[in-house]
Image (cartoon, helix red, strand yellow):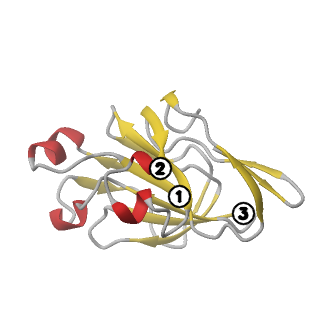
Amino acid sequence: MQLFSKDKKNVVLAQQTGEAVVITDVPDPVFAGKVLGDGIAIIPSSNEVFSPVSGTIAQIAHTLHAIGIESEDGMEVLVHLGIDTVKLNGEGFTCYVEVGQHIVAGDKLMEMDIQFIESKGYNTISPCIITNLNDTKSLKFETGPVIGGKT
């Protein structure tokens, strides 16, 4: 995902390995309707979750299904792992970072056990959205196969 702000271009890496799809393909009206912001979603094929940007961990849901990052240039990025996975109360997720920690784009943040989550009946599609788009001039999304922390 590339964001073109008033004075520069920012690249946001894929947070997971899998298939990147447009946000409107997410089977949840809040994400598909871009209520929280715009971005992309990944249908993961691997359990590892990487940081899409360099910055600081701003928030980690106590149920470990979502993580908020403030990038070094002020972008607010939300990585949401699966749909309705808040109901798992942290089961199936392992977190490797803490709030306030500085991270670099591509650092491993978490793991989500996609087989376990699917066995519990939850969709593992994982949105990555920019929640503060005020300074963004335009967005360009790339869909298709992606490698977490690299593409």
> In the image, is 125 to the left or to the right of 87?
right
**Which residue bears the numbered disc 2?**
23
Element at label 1: strand
Given the image, on which type of amino acid does mark 1 rest? Answer: Ile
Label 2 vs 3, first from the N-terminus: 2
- The location of residue 84, given as percent across then percent down, is 24, 61
Element at label 2: helix
- Image quarter hosting the N terminus: top right
The residue lying at 39 percent from left, 56 percent from top is 96
In the image, residue 16 sits, relative to residue 74, either above or below, namely above
Circle 1 packing at 10 Å, graded few (<14), some (14-19), many (20+), is many
Given the image, on which type of amino acid does mark 2 rest? Answer: Ile
Label 2 vs 1, first from the N-terminus: 2
Whole-angstrom CA distance, mark 2 to mark 3, is 24 Å
The residue lying at 33 percent from left, 46 percent from top is 125
In the image, residue 38 sits, relative to residue 23, either above or below, namely below
Given the image, on which type of amino acid does mark 3 rest? Answer: Glu
The residue lying at 18 percent from left, 51 percent from top is 122
**Which residue bears the numbered disc 1?**
129
Label 1 vs 3, first from the N-terminus: 3
Seen from the viewer's position, the closer of residues 48 and 38 is: 38
Q: Are marks 2 and 1 in contact (CB under 8 Å)?
A: yes
